[in-house]
Amino acid sequence: MEPNRYQVKIFVGCLPSETIESQLYDYLTTFCEVSGLKIKYRSNSVCAGYGHFLCENPSEDTLSLLFSTPHYYQERSIEVR
């Protein structure tokens, strides 16, 4: 029998307009197992500044670390909640 698996959808904001999805994915995987990342883009294909990712089976410690750690991407402070 497969163990129970669940996902938590987490908001990520204050992203720079030059956000590269694969680089942000690599950064987030240092904190948890990411099963999906969706960045919102404007009609001109520029990052709208936010998105969501799915964290697989996060422990309470993992979530606490994700939400309490200051996050920086491309030398800019980003928001994870």
Image: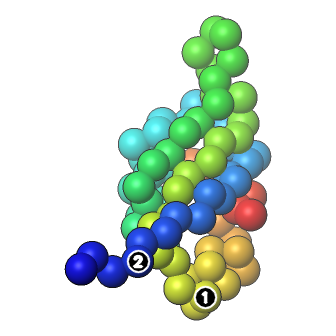
Question: Is residue 24 visible from the viewing direction of this image?
Answer: yes
Outermost residue, front side: 1
- 21 or 1, which is in the foreground? 1
Residue wearing tag 2 = 4
Outermost residue, top side: 44
**Circle 1: is it few (<14), some (14-19), or many (20+) Cα within 10 Å?**
few
Residue wearing tag 1 = 60
Residue at position x 58%, y 90% from top? 61
Identified by mark 1, the residue type is Glu
**Circle 2: is it few (<14), some (14-19), or many (20+) Cα within 10 Å?**
few
- 5 or 60, which is in the foreground? 5
Q: Looking at the rendering, which quadrant does residue 69 occupy?
A: bottom right
Identified by mark 2, the residue type is Asn
Residue 1 percent coordinates (x, y): 24, 80
- 3 or 42, which is in the foreground? 3
Question: Is residue 30 visible from the viewing direction of this image?
Answer: no
Residue at position x 40%, y 77% from top? 4
